Amino acid sequence: MKKIALILLLSVLGGCDGTFGEKGYIWCNNRFIKPDARPFSTKTGTVAQQGYMYALASALTLQADNREGNAHKFYPPKYLEVIDKPDRKHSGFEAATFLRHPLTPGGREEIIIAFAGSNDAADWVGTNLLSSITQYSQAMNYTLKMLDDPRVYDLRMKGAKVVVTGISLGGGLAVHVVKSRLTGPFIDEAWAFNPSPKIYANSDPNDKIWLVASDGEFLSGLRKERWSFLIAGWGNIGAKEKRTVDNFNLIESNGIYAHYRWGIARQMLFAADYMEYKDVPATEPPRPSEPLKILNKSEFKSCEGRYKEARFKQPDMDDVASNADSPPLTSK
């Protein structure tokens, strides 16, 4: 009954804009962590630098054109190009494929296949409660389709990196795909954010998997092995310790709120930006990083009042529009 109540609660919350209780600098777009604050470990910051774009792609794939989406809106930078976004399936399955262009000449192209997480009754009831495996099959089929898509295949033959990613259920789908013998060999990395433990795959460690989570988000407990006999499809995510960071704590909240897409994405962007400026001498002018440019273009309803004011000197953001002015990616 508790599980059913939680699912119903999350379904109800899906009808509001999700801003209740949001307050603080993190909802605005200025740097707010003082350089000497050291709010997290070097490992946490480094993982944020490596993975913020995958968190953004995952959040964008979940971003809907509704009250919640409009209150927590990200925009993709120009170098993150959406090349495929099929219509939502009746099962609730949604995905998008991005082409991440390198910022420097000669850099490596990336193909990012992002799976949407749980955002409606079809996801919560069909996949999470009734244990339908339809979305897992659809994730496999979609990945195979995109790997053979001429736009992707040609880039793969030239050495492009292939990444699968997702938040919540989407993270579970990404793990399912990378652990498959059919698709795993063609995937370089899988980034699972606040992932569901329902992976319908083996529990073996996997060097390709990264597990990133907000501190205390409600699925963190269910990822423990003691729940394996109660949850159909349960499996160990398989990320090794050096590729696991589950302590992003820039947002103080309960476990349910900590699970939301915009929280983990925003924390990773701020953490990645912090790593760019924390050791820069105070005598040098501050410069915008790529994560900060993305944050600067985001629109969050809860940025208000005194939190709009910068705590310290900020970079000149006049050139932001050249790198982050694409329209928002939304699902309906």
Image (tube, helix red, strand yellow):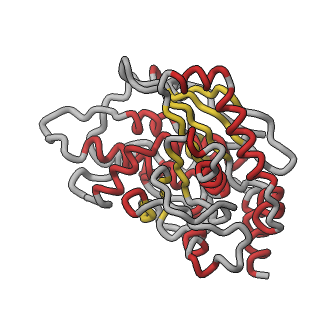
Which is nearer the eye, 53 or 108?
108
Quadrant location, the C terminus: top right
- The structure residue drawn at horizontal position 54% and vertical position 55%, both measured from the top left corner, is 193
Which residue sits furthest right? 90
Q: Could you say where residue 188 lies in the image, as x and y percent from the top left? A: 50, 41
Which quadrant does the N terminus fall into? bottom right
The answer to which image quadrant residue 233 occupies is bottom right
**As drawn, is 156 to the left or to the right of 10?**
left
Please say whether residue 320 is visible from this viewpoint.
no
Image: 280 above or below 38? above
Which residue is painted at 80% across and 41% down in the image? 88
User: Residue 142: where, in percent of width, then height?
Assistant: 73, 39
Residue 306 x %, y %: 42, 51
Q: Is residue 317 above or below residue 200?
A: above
Residue at 59% from the left image edge and 49% from the top image edge? 178
- Number of on-image labels: 0
Residue occupying the point 71% across, 56% down:
118
> In the rendered image, is residue 85 in sight?
yes
Q: Which x, y percent locates residue 239?
A: 48, 60
**Viewer-closest of 198 and 150:** 150
Q: Residue furthest front?
A: 181
Relative depth, front residue between 9 and 306: 9
